[in-house]
Amino acid sequence: MRPVYIAGVALTPIGEHWELSLRDLACEAALKALEKAEVERIDALYVANMGAAPLQSQLHLGALMADALGLYGLPAMRVEAAQASGGVAVHEAHLAVASGLYDSILVVGVEKMSDALPQEVRSALAMAEDQEYTAYTGVTDVGLCALLHRLYMERYEAKPEEIAALAAISHEHAVGCPHAQYPFRVSVERILSSPMEADPIHMLECSGIGDGAAALVLTADRGDVEIAASTVAVDHFFLTERGDPLILEAVRAASRRAYERAGISPRDVDLVELHDSTTIMGILSLEDLGFVEKGFGARYVSEGNVRRGGELPVNTFGGLKARGNPVGATGVYQVAEIALQLLGEAGRCQVEDAEVGLAENLGGIASTASITILRRR
Amino acid sequence: MVLKTSRPVGIIGYGAYIPMNRLKTSEISRVWGGCTEPIEEKAVASIDEDAVTIAVECARYAIKRAKIDPREIGAIYVGTESKPYAVKPCGTIVAEAIGATPHVTAADYEFACKAGTEAFQACIGLVSSGMVKYAMAIGADTAQGRPADPLEYTVACGGAAFIFTLKSERTLAYLEGSYSYVTDTPDFWRRGLEMYPRHGNRFTGEPAYFRHIIGAAKGLMAELGHGPEDFRYAVFHQPNVKFPVKVAKRLGFSMDAIKPGLIVPYVGNTYAGSTPIGLAATLDVAEPGDRILVVSYGSGAGSDAFSFVVQDAIMEGRPRDLPVSAFIARRRYIDYSLYSRMRGKIHL
Amino acid sequence: MSAPRYWREIKYRYRLMGELCTECGAIVFPRRSLCPHCGCRELEECKLSETGTVLSWTVIQHPPKGYEKYAPYVIALIKLDDGAQILSQVVDVEPEEMRVGLRVEATFRRVREDGSSGIIEYGYKFRPIIEEP
């Protein structure tokens, strides 16, 4: 296995891009990334996407995007793992280059959620869960998180404002971020006074609906950021069959393996891009990634430790909450953002002296977890 | 003509179910003005309830009380005028939900408010002929009331199920005989694609309700050689409070006799569920040896009259499950707007 | 939902049928080809307990497509008395009455329908246990 580097990254701003189609967005990001990477050729194309089938009735994205980018003859395919599609696509690309089979791969994550009505988007997101017994109850992705949020508060006596702090800090970090969907501050008070989305989760604790595309070029030689490790793990698909629903076993398994491969421990990580689809998922993630003991995540966050200048900067461009969450593309955004941090190109969002960054991308109720660790070359 | 079975038939289990939502008649008056019915409130099905779900609930309670293996039920008939499917029997869904499939016959009956007791007649026949071991008859409805119509004050949701088998020491009550009195009398009807029924107002009284109930009751009592004094209890179809009280008096029954089965003041007229629930409520208090007269009425029109005698097994069988009073006591008040939503009167 | 897809799950949804692992004794719901806890392939059909206790709950304010008519509704994680866990709506209860530890029992309700001409889908939901007054 040889090292893999990131030669170029590009991100489109996240928002409601009424005039741009799935193709338009993907091409915008992909062409920019290719330009930056200055590679001679691309050996494979991986497209990360979750919702194009239910929302745009579009399958076969590999061939579609290759055609849109004028790439013919090469292998191209969609990688899908619900909201973890982005991270898993990076994993696939990484192993293809590391194996020696391909020298350079283009990974594009793209999602267009504003094309559909909110209830259609909710149904599409619920496709990450079992349709016959989980989604059949009428539960939504936020609803499942709410069950964990309540359990967490009861078991660890965590306060709503401690958990909500993650969203407030994420918003702070998005200020000045050129690609963030919500680049403005939101206070904990404002968050807790927003209407309940699914009791006890408030509306402003949930990531929004947005369109966006992010692209990376992975190579065997070019680039100043190395992928130190890329792992994926799955957990029991049914929340009802997990030993402890507050432990994200997929995160534990994938991160353990990732730290091992990268030869580091959590202490060595300088910044983390968490999967805060809802605040509670971000809190549980922090704990199962090994940064904080189980049950202490909310307190750790509310004490300000996760600010850019703090002990463990988290969601440095705003995370899923403030930067945005165009689901299938999110994992690619996370990796691109860490690359920007390590290259010193993060602008107002810069974390000083960042050497090692970790991206965590989850699918469904953390049934899939993808961990990508990047290191400055 | 009295319908007498070749072999004696009894009830081995029964169960009722009434949804928990209640709409006060004063609330309806608030919206439409003027109500003279002594009914206080009526039971309203939740938005995720219908005649099928109510029938399933009753069936499950009846099986619990009967303590039988549902696979031995040979027939399931559901009497209702609010079928969720015009074509596809409630009976098959109930059969599947209680685990009686596939060795079973199932279908739906329609005869307005006496559809449930129609099902009784069929079950009694199947059982006494030896064709099936157990037969279940269910009367369940979530009938619709036209807004502002006088019937809107009374139309309600609920049901009860009865499991019939050959009389034995295990049966809770046995049947002495039944009598059906049917004519073509268009007092109340609903055409195929209409949401609400129409009725003949005062025409639904003497020529309809009273004529058929009295015809069936007198016919049965004459053939069995009984008078009102031989019956401890009587259950009459209860579309409102006035009618059953009046017909009881005319037939010579006291208020005490009809009281246990008179649930309409608390839950309204549950249509095909009305007489069956009345019988269930009476069985909840009756003692071994008590004779009960049951006379249903269905618009269109007709009445089925039954004479049941309570057996010793009622003492053991009765406490096996919830009495009707448990469902009457379980209430949540809703207002007219929530009622309109629950009953699908507001189109999304 | 297509009629065949709905029909396939009827027994399990209507009667709370699951499976019992003959190796480790776990109750498996929904049914599987092998036990999710020990991997054993010898599973026997069994009926789940119809009563249980609420472990956690929420209220769905913004439902997915098809459930708009029923919103808002309560969803709960329930631990059944036989040890199995199940995710289900809880009905006949106001959100203010919901609490961890509430005793509930299974009931049979409409889940959704395919417009005014498609099939009606039924299934289990739970409600606070009805007691004698």
Image (spheres, grey):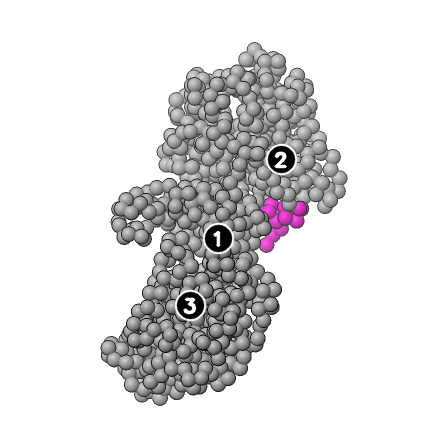
Total of numbered circles in the picture?
A: 3
Q: Quadrant of residue B325?
A: top right
- Which corner quadrant holds the N terminus of chain B? top right
Q: Nearer the viewer, mark 3 or mark 2?
A: 3
The residue under the point 55% across, 13% down is: B223
Amino acid marked by disc 2: Val
- The x and y percentages for residue A114 are 51, 70
Classed neighbour count for the residue bearing mark 1: other residues with Cα under 10 Å, few (<14), some (14–19), many (≥20): many
**Residue linked to disc 2:** B267
Q: Is residue A163 magenta?
A: no
The residue under the point 49% across, 18% down is: B311
Report helix, strand or loop for mark 2.
helix
**Residue linked to disc 3:** A292
Amino acid marked by disc 3: Val
**Residue linked to disc 1:** C56
Q: Chain of mark 2?
A: B
Q: Nearer the viewer, residue B219 or C110?
A: C110
Q: Which residues are magenta?
A: B335-348
Report helix, strand or loop for mark 3.
loop
In this image, A180 relative to A6: left or right? right
